[in-house]
Every structure is written in structure tokens, then in C-alpha cells.
Amino acid sequence: MKLIVQDIQKSFNSKEVLRGASFTFEKGKIYGLLGRNGAGKTTLFNCLNEDLKIDGGSFSIEENGQIRSIESNDIGYVLSLPVVPEFLTGREFLKFFIEINQNRMQDVRSIDEYFDFMKIDSEDRDRLLKDYSHGMKNKMQMLVNFIANPAILLLDEPLTSFDVVVADEMKQLLRRIKEDHIIIFSTHIMELALDLCDEIVILNEGILEEIKKENLDQTAFKDKIIAALRGEEND
């Protein structure tokens, strides 16, 4: 499976944020989407998730040699600021989510198995979501996306609210599931992208560009990424 992004354009009034962004993302890889603050990473995700209407271009899925439109079931989107129903407990939220999605879910497990999968402690499972920390809310947001099991996962700065131990657990989890997904991981932290991701894609001045490591050592590769983010030419 491939996600084909072709010439995406998006402007806000006179500000051109995406000006012909094109790239092909393949299943089985974690792509690190790097860009400076305000480069348009979240805008790109919102366009792919159809939360924003694009001004031009297209995106589609290639599967078994056939091109088709993206459907809502294809994409899971983890927002940088988690949105959860704070009037529900963690258990009530999962129960509700599973009930409304069970017709398109395979291998449905018990709620506690899902909590165990995400390593959410027993004492937190029946607490109101409004009393969860930012990191805990982010865990719940990631969990429902993993339960839905979409082909494409858009992760917008998903690890910044986690402590070191939980962030490492999430990285290990993403590595385990990547073979069955296209994972695009947006971040402005270069070291995190280099540690986790298989490919590095830069969003700079509205254009997507892959930065290949080739035979560079870690320092030279970082220098190449920084040069690309500055819009400088690389040899």
C-alpha cells in the first residue's frame, strides 16, 4: 500500500502554506516529518484528514496496483493537543468507542486487554478523563487509534507530553506495528526523528523533500537536515 500525495496546495488568505507538496509514503515505514515551527506540518495533516479543504492537488491510496480515494476508515489522526470526552471515565470512553466501531473491527478484545496494551494502570481506568494528565489523555487518544487500526497513522507531535519511560514504550510500540501501517510522525525534534523513523521528510516553504542518509555519519546527516530546513543547497 502507498499513500500518494500529489501537488497539495493550501493557503490562508494571502499566506501560501502548502505550495505543491508531493510525496509517496509506503506501508511498513515510519516517516519523520520535520519542519520548523509554522512550516505547515499540522496543516498538511488536516488536509489529509479532510479537516481542511485543499486548494489544489490530490491524495490517494495505491493498493494491489489500483488507485482509489482515501476513505475515513483509512486514516487515524493523533492530535498534538488530545481531545477526549472529559465527562466519561477511561473505561466508559473505550466501551463507547468499541460499540460504535465494532462492525468494522477485527479481533475485538476486552477493555482491560486494551488498557494493558497501552500500559494504563488499573487505578486510572475508572477515573474521569478530565482528571487525566495531558500525557494520559494522549495515551487514550493513541489507544483508540490503535484499536481502530487504520492503514495510515498521522501522529502530530505525539510523544512530547510523555516522560522518558512512556515515550520509549510508545516508540517500541510504533516499531512493532509499523509493518502493517503507513506511519507519518510529525515532530520538530530532530533527535527523536532520527531515533525512531526509517525515512526523514522535510516540509520547507510548502514543499516536501526526502533527505537521504546515504553514507553520511550521524553528524553529517544532521547538518544536511539543518541545511535543508534553512533552505540551503546541499552537495
Image (cartoon, rainbow, N blue to C red):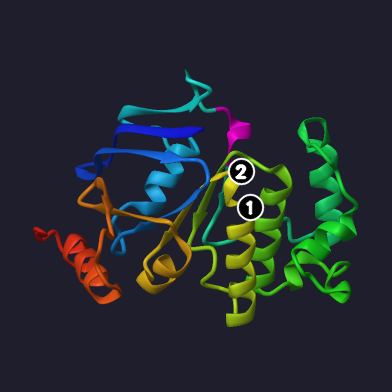
What amino acid type should be assigned to the residue bearing mark 2?
Asp
Q: Residue at x 74, y 61 (%)?
A: 86
Q: Is residue 140 above or below residue 190?
A: above
Label 2 near label 1: C-beta < 8 Å? Answer: yes
Numbered disc 1: secondary structure: helix
Q: Is residue 165 above or below residue 35?
A: below
Instruction: State the predominant SS element of the stretch in magenta.
Output: helix
Assign the C terminus to one quadrant of the image.
bottom left
Farthest residue in the front direction?
A: 215
Q: Is residue 219 above or below residue 204?
A: below
Tell me, for residue 177, which label it has, or none: 1
Farthest residue in the bottom direction?
A: 164
Q: Is residue 182 magenta?
A: no
Q: Estimate how packed mark 2 is, as few (under 14), some (14 to 19) or many (20 or more) residues with alpha carbons within 10 Å.
A: some
Give the percent coordinates (x, y) of residue 141.
66, 57
The residue tagged 2 is 180
Q: Residue at x 53, y 46 (%)?
A: 28
What is the quadrant of residue 121 in the picture?
A: bottom right
Give the percent coordinates (x, y) of residue 95.
86, 49
The answer to whether residue 140 is left or right of residue 218 is right
Q: Residue at x 22, y 43 (%)?
A: 16
What amino acid type should be assigned to the residue bearing mark 1?
Ile
What is the quadrant of residue 194 in the picture?
A: bottom left
Q: Is residue 145 above or below residue 213?
A: above
**Stretch of the chain drawn in magenta:** 71-75
